Image: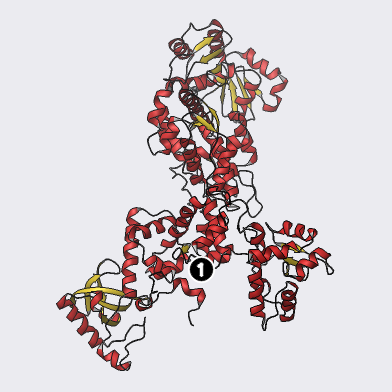
């Protein structure tokens, strides 16, 4: 198969075929002329080109021109760089720099200066750096695949709104019809359709003649052109069009696209536009406007308060799942009912509850237990996390949030199969989320300290940076979620980036700036006569753990209010505490005297606690007060328990002990469970933990960015492979004679016998010279290599492989041919 124009970008001309003016004749030549730093920058900007590492520059150029890679590169261009590529797609190929500049900034000195001319070199450099454009300034060439994606077609108009050229629109038109158009336009008849189309194109690209032709147009015809000039360039017509449309069609200002549509030729549209490819070029990124300015200490204080609230919320969430966590759905994730229940427990709406659940999961604090009846619960890492200082606990949460690809904002949406996405379930990964979060924080960091942005201007900036439809919509949604989540977490305060958030963005430990902003844990509470306790700040861990059992949280905020109830006191007694323990605990941790009503409540519940004993008969109730047992039997509410008197102090029940305990407590009694030996059972619920689970791994957006080591190794491999592919070689005498003195054809491996191969590599090993070989490995893959043999023995040759940049051993019987390099290549 011959090499046609479509393959020109990947063609590697022989050294003798280089253009006389030194300009590259292909994308491969342009890449070959780059230095190592420029090649490394290309591979860093387009990491998909490294999978796998190209064998030489020709393979790199070929891969850079594939559709998938070009689409990915176009998606990451900013708006003006994309507008520049779109202008090149509708420009002549190759395109001089002046023509491109006129397409973007207009021709003539009277065109408005909006910074387009000043920004064009930067945009063009971006396209060149990413191998989307190659060639000198007088011969700019857009990569063929990018031109196909951005150029207009009948099924897909150009993003510029321009249509096909006259030559493209008249490709299927009869010669007679073309001559009729030429005559109606006032041009002399030609002898063939090609010259007729050329004459018509010349008319439409001549400003003076084109203006004279349009001056003859009826006013209604100019209105038709005005509707089509900025796109889309297609319009529907009837079989008998109106006179203005007929006037335009007869003169070729509108050309038939189908039997019912006409199209405005590109040359006509450019004349009407004043030569502009875009109505509004956007060479400069829009500024992020400041909505409000706050004092930085106020921002940090607000963020610290949010951080404390985030720690309390996450801890409350995980602890609420440690005894009986919600079940895992068959398809994975949390059910709608459990999400609503969790939201009610956290006093939050469902989207916010989903965020806290996903954050705890991303931090490795929650996971599924992996049992047959699978449930969610805390991981062992939760216990370690709770022991950390508050600032370090927050650092762990924020550090898990920033790079996470799981997006809680997608909960409630539907996947491609129509299934609703659930928290902790599959389908929540959005690979662009980490990059968008980081970019939003970077834009916030660029504002004056303490300034909060105008959200719409922030979205406009992000849209300018990634303008491709679909990509920009997703980024806008992720940016809105980022602003909300950052405020909830305390990365921002009042919309402005806080000091801990700035440290998180700059890869510093955010715990250091956060720690001074957090209040010290308190070990005192304020007990009040209305059976409440007020915690004036975050409580020390021992106090918080006991108080969480002894009282119920009534309200949260700057100060947490706990309420003591008979049920909460009984819960503490069930946990093994005695009345004297509770009195001593409250006296020790109260900043005021213990109120008398609270002491009475504890004593009253303790006095009744354990008077009734429940065991397994199925179950029984034992009490020294037979009158109390008679009272229970007489109570109609006890009918469902199936009680009957076995002895004056013993009742038997059909219900199991747990149900019996709950039933008696519902009737207002305070029974205690006892063991088979008659001892009171301490009903402390064991905190359940899942097996150790790894944190969810973020799903990267495309290939991972290569590090410096990989980039350096890849550039060396490409250079070495290119040396092997393009080095000029001496042909062996036998091969030259076989070829009639002409040697092997260019690019082909000369076939040498085993004896000639052995003699050549032995001579190279003795003289320390470099040779070129063709080699077939054990998998049958053929490659070309440049090696410096150092030892030949036992059927193997060992030498320095310039292609791989390392010492390797090759089997002699797998070497297909060998040749010495030309003298100027050594």
The percent coordinates of residue 283 (x first, y second) are 53, 49
The percent coordinates of residue 6 (x first, y second) are 51, 74
Q: Is residue 123 in view from this perspective?
A: yes
- Residue drawn where x is 55% and y is 48% of the image: 113
Q: Which one is nearer the viewer's eye here, 181 or 61?
A: 181
Quadrant that contains the C terminus: bottom left
Relative side of 237 to 602, left or right? right
Relative side of 387 to 302, left or right? left
Q: Is residue 155 in view from this perspective?
A: no
Q: Which one is nearer the viewer's eye here, 796 or 301?
A: 301
Q: Which one is nearer the viewer's eye here, 353 or 109?
A: 109
Q: Which one is nearer the viewer's eye here, 459 or 275?
A: 275
Relative side of 308 to 178, left or right? left
Give the vertical position of 8 relative to 682 (above or below): below
Q: Residues within 10 Å of mark 1 (few under 14, many from 20)?
A: some
Give the vertical position of 298 relative to 768 (above or below): above
Question: Colour mode?
Answer: secondary structure
Q: Element under label 1? A: loop
Residue at the spot of label 1:
94
Quadrant in which residue 351 is drawn: top right
Quadrant in which residue 455 is drawn: top right
- Residue drawn where x is 53% and y is 51% of the image: 116
């Amino acid at each position: 198969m011959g090499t046609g124009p479509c393959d020109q970008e990947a063609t590697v001309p022989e050294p003798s075929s280089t253009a006389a003016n030194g300009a590259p004749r292909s994308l491969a030549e342009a890449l070959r002329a780059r230095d190592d730093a420029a090649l490394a920058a290309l591979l860093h900007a387009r990491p998909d080109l490294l999978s796998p590492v190209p064998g030489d520059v020709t393979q790199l150029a070929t891969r850079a021109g594939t559709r998938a890679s070009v689409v990915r590169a176009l998606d990451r261009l900013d708006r003006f760089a994309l507008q520049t590529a779109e202008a090149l797609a509708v420009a002549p190929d190759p395109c001089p720099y002046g023509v491109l500049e006129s397409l973007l900034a207009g021709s003539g000195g009277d065109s408005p200066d909006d910074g387009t001319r000043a920004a064009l070199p930067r945009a063009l450099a971006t396209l060149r750096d990413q191998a989307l454009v190659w060639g000198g300034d007088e011969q700019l060439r857009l990569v063929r695949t990018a031109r196909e994606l951005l150029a207009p077609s009948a099924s897909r108009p150009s993003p510029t709104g321009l249509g096909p050229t006259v030559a493209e629109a008249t490709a299927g038109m009869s010669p007679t019809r073309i001559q009729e158009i030429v005559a109606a336009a006032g041009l002399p008849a030609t002898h063939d359709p090609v010259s007729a189309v050329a004459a018509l194109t010349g008319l439409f690209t001549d400003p003076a003649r084109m203006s004279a032709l349009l001056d003859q147009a009826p006013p209604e015809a100019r209105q038709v052109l005005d509707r089509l000039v900025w796109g889309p360039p297609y319009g529907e017509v009837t079989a008998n069009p109106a006179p203005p449309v007929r006037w335009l069609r007869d003169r070729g200002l509108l050309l038939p696209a189908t039997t019912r549509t006409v199209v405005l030729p590109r040359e006509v549209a450019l004349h009407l536009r004043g030569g502009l490819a875009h109505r509004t070029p956007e060479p400069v990124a829009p500024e992020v406007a400041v909505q409000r300015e706050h004092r930085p200490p106020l921002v940090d204080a607000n963020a610290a308060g949010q951080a404390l609230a985030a720690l309390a919320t996450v801890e409350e969430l995980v602890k609420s799942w440690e005894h009986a966590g919600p079940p895992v759905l068959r398809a994975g994730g949390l059910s709608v009912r459990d999400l609503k229940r969790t939201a009610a427990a956290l006093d939050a709406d469902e989207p916010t509850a989903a965020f806290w659940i996903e954050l705890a999961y991303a931090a490795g604090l929650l996971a599924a237990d992996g049992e047959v009846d699978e449930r969610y619960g805390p991981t062992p890492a939760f216990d370690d996390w709770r022991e950390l200082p508050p600032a370090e606990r927050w650092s762990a949460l924020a550090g898990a949030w920033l790079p996470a690809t799981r997006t809680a904002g997608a909960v409630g949406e539907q996947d491609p199969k129509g299934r609703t996405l659930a928290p902790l379930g599959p389908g929540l990964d959005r690979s662009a989320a980490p990059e968008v979060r980081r970019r939003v924080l970077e834009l916030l960091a660029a504002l004056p300290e303490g300034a909060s942005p105008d959200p719409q201007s922030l979205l406009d900036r992000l849209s300018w940076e990634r303008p491709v439809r679909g990509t920009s919509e997703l980024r806008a949604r992720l940016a809105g979620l980022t602003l909300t989540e950052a405020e909830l977490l305390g990365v921002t305060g009042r919309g402005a980036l806080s000091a801990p958030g700035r440290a998180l963005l700059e890869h510093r430990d955010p715990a250091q700036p956060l720690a001074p902003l957090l209040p010290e844990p308190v070990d005192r509470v304020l007990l009040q006569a209305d059976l409440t306790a007020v915690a004036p700040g975050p409580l020390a861990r021992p106090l918080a753990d006991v108080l969480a059992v002894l009282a119920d949280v009534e309200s949260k905020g700057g100060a947490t209010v706990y309420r003591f109830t008979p049920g909460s006191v009984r819960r503490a007694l069930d946990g093994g505490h005695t009345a004297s323990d509770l009195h001593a605990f409250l006296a020790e941790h109260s900043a005021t005297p213990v109120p008398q009503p609270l002491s009475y409540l504890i004593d009253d519940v303790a006095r009744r606690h354990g008077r009734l004993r429940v065991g397994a008969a199925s179950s029984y109730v034992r009490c020294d007060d037979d009158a109390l047992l008679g009272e229970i039997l007489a109570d109609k509410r006890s009918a469902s328990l199936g009680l009957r008197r076995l002895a004056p102090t013993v009742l038997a029940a059909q219900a199991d002990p747990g149900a019996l305990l709950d039933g008696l407590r519902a009737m207002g009694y305070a029974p205690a469970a006892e063991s088979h030996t008659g001892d009171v059972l301490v009903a402390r619920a064991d905190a359940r933990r899942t097996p150790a689970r790894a944190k969810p791994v973020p799903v990267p957006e495309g290939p991972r960015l290569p590090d410096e080591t990989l980039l350096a190794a890849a550039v060396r491999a490409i250079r070495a492979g290119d040396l092997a592919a393009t080095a000029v070689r001496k042909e062996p005498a036998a091969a030259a004679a076989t070829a009639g003195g002409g040697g092997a054809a260019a690019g082909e491996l000369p076939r040498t016998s085993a004896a000639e191969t052995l003699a050549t590599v032995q001579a190279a090993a003795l003289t320390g010279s470099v040779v070129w070989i063709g080699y077939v490995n054990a998998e049958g893959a053929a490659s070309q290599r440049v090696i410096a043999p150092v030892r030949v023995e036992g059927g193997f040759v060992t030498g320095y492989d310039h292609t791989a940049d390392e010492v390797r051993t090759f089997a002699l019987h797998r070497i297909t041919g060998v040749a010495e390099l030309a003298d100027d290549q050594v």
